Amino acid sequence: KKNFDMKNAVIGNNRQKANLIVLGAVPRLLYLLQQSSSSLELRTECAVVLGSLSMGTENNIKSLVDCHIIPALLQGLLCSDLIFIEACLRCLRTIFISPVTPVQLLYTDPTVIPHLMSLLSRSQHTQEYITQIFAHCCKTPEHQTVLFNHGAIQNIAPLLISPSYKVRMQALKCFSVLAYENAQVSMTLVNVLVDGEQLSQVFVRMMQRDKPIEMQLTAAKCLTYMCRAGAIRTDDNCIVLKTLPCLVRMCSKERLLEERVEGAETLAYLMEPDIELQRIASVTDHLVSMLADYFKYPSSVSAITDIKRYIDFNSRCNQLDHDLKHAHELRQAAFKLYASLGSNDEDIRKKITETENMMDRIVSGLSESSIKVRLAAVRCLHSLSRSVQQLRTSFHDHAVWKPLMKLLQNAPDEVLVMASSTLCNLLLEFSPSKEPILESGVIELLCSLTQSDSPALRVNGIWALMNMAFQADQKVKVEIVQALGTEQLFRLLSDPDTNVLMKTLGLLRNLLSTRPHIDQIMSSHGKQIMQAVTLILEGEHSIEVKEQTLCILANIADGNTAKELIMTNDDMLQKIKYYMGHSNVKLQLAATFCISNLIWNEEDGSQERQDKLREMGFVDILHKLTQASDPNLCDRAKTAMQQYLA
Amino acid sequence: MALPSCQQRALRRALCSTTVPTRHCRAAVIRGYLTAAVSLLTKMAELGAGSLLTGDPAFNYHEHELNERLKRLYPAVNEEETPLPRSWSPKDKYSYIGLSQNNLRVHYKGHGKNHKDAASVRATHPIPAACGIYYFEVKIVSKGRDGYMGIGLSAQGVNMNRLPGWDKHSYGYHGDDGHSFCSSGTGQPYGPTFTTGDVIGCCVNLINNTCFYTKNGHSLGNNLMKNDLRPNLYPTVGLQTPGEIVDANFGQQPFVFDIEDYMSEWRAKIHSMIARFPIGERLGDWQSVLQNMVSSYLVHHGYCATAMAFSRATETMIQEDQTSIKNRQRIQKLVLAGRVGEAIDATQQLYPGLLEHNPNLLFMLKCRQFVEMVNGTDSEVRCFSVHSPKSQDSYPGSPNLSPRHGATNAHLHNTGADSPTCSNGVTPTNKNKSHNKYTGVSSASSSPSSSPSSVNYSESNSTDSTKSQPHSATSNQETSDSEMEIEAEHYSNGVTESSTRIMNGTYKHQEILQADDSSVGNGVADDSCSSRQLCGGNQAATERMIQFGRELQALSEQLCRQYGKNATHKKMLQDAFSLLAYSDPWNCPVGQQLDPMQREAICSALNSAILESQNLPKQPPLMLALGQATECVQLMARVRSGSCSFARVDNFLH
């Protein structure tokens, strides 16, 4: 009886709830709940009161969880009485959907999930609460696997046609979290029939325009995840004609801010790998200009406080707070979507950069306080930086390199990866931003990136240096070599990441171009470079790596004094000989190129070199190669032979 | 269907003949005339049916599909008032345009040197506002030399030597640059370009007066149109260089773009707008208005006990006194049972002077009485069949033979079902199905049917249906009992049905509806038709009918002299008399008159007249409101408010 009073006292009153908790009511309630000697009525009332307490603040929930309410309630589910089970589930639901509850608590006892699955058939209430718990507690691939292995799909699929809207909706949410980046779940889902209908068709029906927005959006997420996991083709009508247009609609002004954020993020994810979807989306419902509206919400905090001062606090501030809260989210979602839209098609990139104030928005996005926005902005910039035309025009006009450089100074790795990758593109030789960036002292920064633990950052660092060294002045090259240091250079040449190795070789090759540069660098670092080349040619490397290395050797052979480093190294000459007879044409070509440079007529000492190489049997090889089936190789060999004939 | 004049004359001669041969003889004469008439009519009917079947069957199939799709997409459009576009107009085009393939394919046949050689064609009809949302598609069969094609809309009279969009009241989306032109020579960047193989759609939203285009099933987004679209726009295409060919789809084929999905969104929007219409502080007022509406509706149709119970529960007042309600109820029941003669007598007794002041109503009643005589239901002919109790089974008019009550107008039928107890005002025993429990006198409640002294009976019984005189016609006991049950059942359906008529307002509407009904399904009780006979198969009854027919003819002539010619009367009389022209009146082109449902119109007219004579509203406010709402929606269509298509009254009657 006391419980009834308690229930009525606490319902709807957060302070009373907190009081009760402070007074220690929870352990008492839990005790009564667990006492099998208590009457079912009493135990049910206890669960109801606990449920009411959990509806309070986050602190209430923390206290409840600390009192081990979750195991107690889960234990309660073993009872056979449906009313009691429903009361326990209702309370569990409320606790599990709170952000303060550790999700893992659902999975500690391995018998819980199968039991919950078995309770799904009991009533619409159990269905609603359990699916809601699953939808909130499926956060990792491990969770997905646990739920999948316990038959989540077969058990939840029929709920999609439940007469209760809440059940349908929660079941749908379950599928969206289960399918996310999960090929196993997604592949299973496409084959599931609900009442004789394919699941994808059920989702399509849920996206119909007269359905609630929440339902349309979640169904579109399910299909998006199934598509990205490879279970549905990107040219399937349910993606092209249904999911994509539905997500575009979710970005429209008429939708709530939350819906617009989710819609844009999901759409960005859907079309990321597919140029055709990007093309369709770019012309659907003026998406590109629709996204511009995402930026029309307050951004800087100071501006907000100014506005707040002028607005009546009670009336408008809630709206403003709401807008402000979502303003960051909106901006980052829009940047993400722009990034995805523009990742392949030049025309779309042009359309994006021509959107009102687009470049300004990116530039200010790069320096926003929210890391999420900065990351999305730099992703967008990166996507657009793949356009030669944009690099030459809008990127230079808006001096995007400045905020980008600033961003590189001090940022978390994920931002750095994107920013440095963008910088690589900005350092391409045709980019007008290359000069100012060079002058801003970027070399130090890039060199420090090459020492990062993250392979992606090392690649980007060395890649940027490589681009920078391409057809660069002697001064720049020297600067790069000095800043990087030969030690670091050779460390990179033995980097476990092939990409890093390739870009480092690329850097070497760019450094060793034009004769004076070759001789100068080789005179100071010749020994180490020759060692490194030997090492790579002897090591287990891919054809591409070896080809690149042979090209470096060919460049060295083009130097005036550098040549001698090869000519005096019989071991190296043997290696060249070996590669001229290699089964791979590319390697043969590069090796032949190297020899061709060594025996070139018009240079000092060419006669001696020709003689030496003839002795070593190179002429015979060249002669053989003139009969090669590959026309390039054949030509190259003939050109080399002519040096002897002249 | 009207009879050919020669047969009419023959009939009239038969009915009006002053020479009175013997009964049998006269019947024979009539039959002689009639056989000839029937054979002629049958031939005509066959001819008519034959002409429908001629033509290309494939084309008919497409035509059928087109009609079905248009009906589904634009249910609110009344094509008799505002036909939908189905093809390009061979008359409304520039000379450089050629049409083929049932006027759906458009090709360019000019020089195509420059923009002065542009040419357009409009559809046959403008887009009706009642569409709410209108859509058509055009497939680019060939982009020709330069692909200067424009798809869009234009008003009547806009220069056809131009592409759509260049001039005032003209809008278009152009393939060469993807720009949208809104009444201007310079376009706005709008969408992608389009070319051979693409399907371009144009959607007009008459609710918010915007339009958008689609490409290959994808919406390209609202046009940047600042001005509202003007009304009565025609689908239009324009071409400008040789070789350009486009095919239109006005609904002949499924659309590439999911227009129905788009429509469903707007339907949901408008429905929720209506559902959320703010009532505010007038909530109390609304409740009492609603209560009065329900109460007056119950009273109007004579649901006496229900009305009383309702007024007690809601504490509302009833204007009319109970006796009056019951009287009306009784008269209505007589009409609905097909006993129109008795109904006329009762009316004359209870409301003296009413019918005298309403000669039109009286005439209608008499016509109906004649029809019921043919049916064998009117007491004037039923009295003859007293010796053959079996004949009652074959009452063609027995209302429970009619399964159509629910089907014809489902939503209204349901409304009727909601209004409580059908047995209201009738003795409760009627609900009981086991007739055989009743014995002789005790069950002689209100079964007047087969009383041999029917005239006396109807007079004496006219005070109150529940207080019928005891009589000793035990032989008819069972049938009369079942008759009562039939009445009770029919009562509920009948009233609601009659309310349909009222709802639809004017007299003219009723006729239209009746005509519709006949096309829906004739000969309801086909299986029982063999057992049905003219006037219940009784010779004396037939003679009485002929006699009555003559009186009716005389009345018509009298009215004609008094008030001038009346086409409606003439038609009514013709139709009624035409029944005699067939050996099986229930299965003939005019046999639909015999359907018990047809009693409902006259029943409600009579009820309204009585109420009017008592200075009470002749229609219940509920029906007035419904009728008004329906009219308003139709008016919206006429004043081109597109939302009418999604705000149909039907959608809100459950």
Image: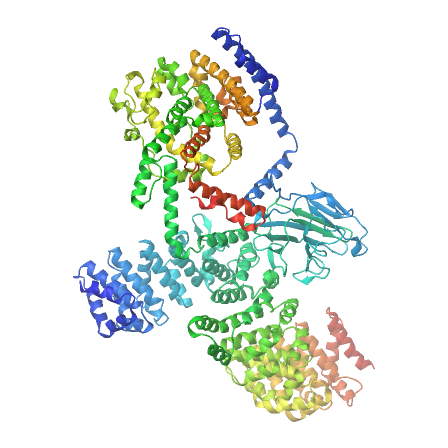
Does B151 sit left or right of B627 as displayed?
right
**Residue A547 coordinates in the image, percent (x, y):** 65, 77
B597 relative to A599, above or below: above
B113 relative to A399, above or below: above
> Farthest left residue?
A37
Quadrant the N terminus of chain B occupies: top right
Does B331 sit left or right of B130 as displayed?
left
Q: Quadrant of residue A214?
A: bottom left
**Residue A508 coordinates in the image, percent (x, y):** 64, 84
Does A584 sit left or right of A217 as displayed?
right
Quadrant the C terminus of chain B occupies: top left
* Front position in the image: A493 or A590: A493
**Residue A87 coordinates in the image, percent (x, y):** 27, 60
Q: Quadrant of residue B105?
A: top right
**Residue A356 coordinates in the image, percent (x, y):** 62, 71
What residue lies at 78% left-to-right and 77% top-to-bottom? Answer: A639
